[in-house]
Image (cartoon, rainbow, N blue to C red):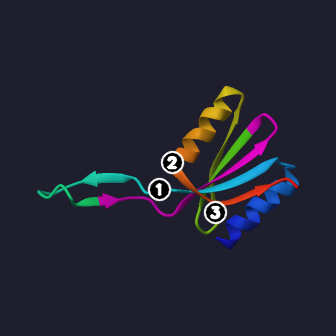
Amino acid sequence: MKSLREFARRELVEKKADEVVVYRLKFEKIVRRGRTPGFQMRGGEGKFYVCVFTGDNLRVYSMSEGGAQMGAEDFSGAAKEKAASDVSKDGKIVFRFTKK
């Protein structure tokens, strides 16, 4: 978590972002097995999204709990709003940093 916080602060300063928000993704139910419908297996390692808002652009980094970057995507315009709402719906806010 410490490495995620440092990464978010560094993005805020270096990219001159308006806001940086770190989300913890909710675990998805991936398999429902057996005779008992209550038995479910959950998948995924602790995965985080780091959303960097800069003007009309949004960059979403996918990261592991250890701070290893697993990919990134850029969004702008109407796609920015949709991506931001999807991420906020699928996760829970861990950190939020804004420009002072």
**Which of the two discs, 1 and 2, labels the residue nearer the N terminus?**
1
Q: Mark 1 packing: few (<14 Cα in 10 Å), some, or many (20+)?
A: some
- Residue 90's tag is 2
Q: Which residues are magenta?
A: 41-57
Q: Position of residue 72 (x, y in %)?
A: 66, 46
**Which of the two discs, 3 and 2, labels the residue nearer the N terminus?**
3
Tag 1 residue = 26
Tag 3 residue = 68
Q: Residue at x 71, y 66 (%)?
A: 5
Q: Residue at x 81, y 60 (%)?
A: 10
Q: What secondary structure is the stretch in magenta mostly built from?
A: strand
Q: Residue at x 68, y 65 (%)?
A: 4
- Residue 87's tag is none
Q: Position of residue 40 (x, y in %)?
A: 27, 58
Q: Are marks 1 and 2 in contact (CB under 8 Å)?
A: yes
Spatial CA distance of label 3 from label 1 is 18 Å
* Disc nearest the viewer among 3 and 1: 1
- Residue type at numbered disc 3: Ala
- Residue type at numbered disc 1: Lys
Q: Quadrant of residue 13?
A: bottom right
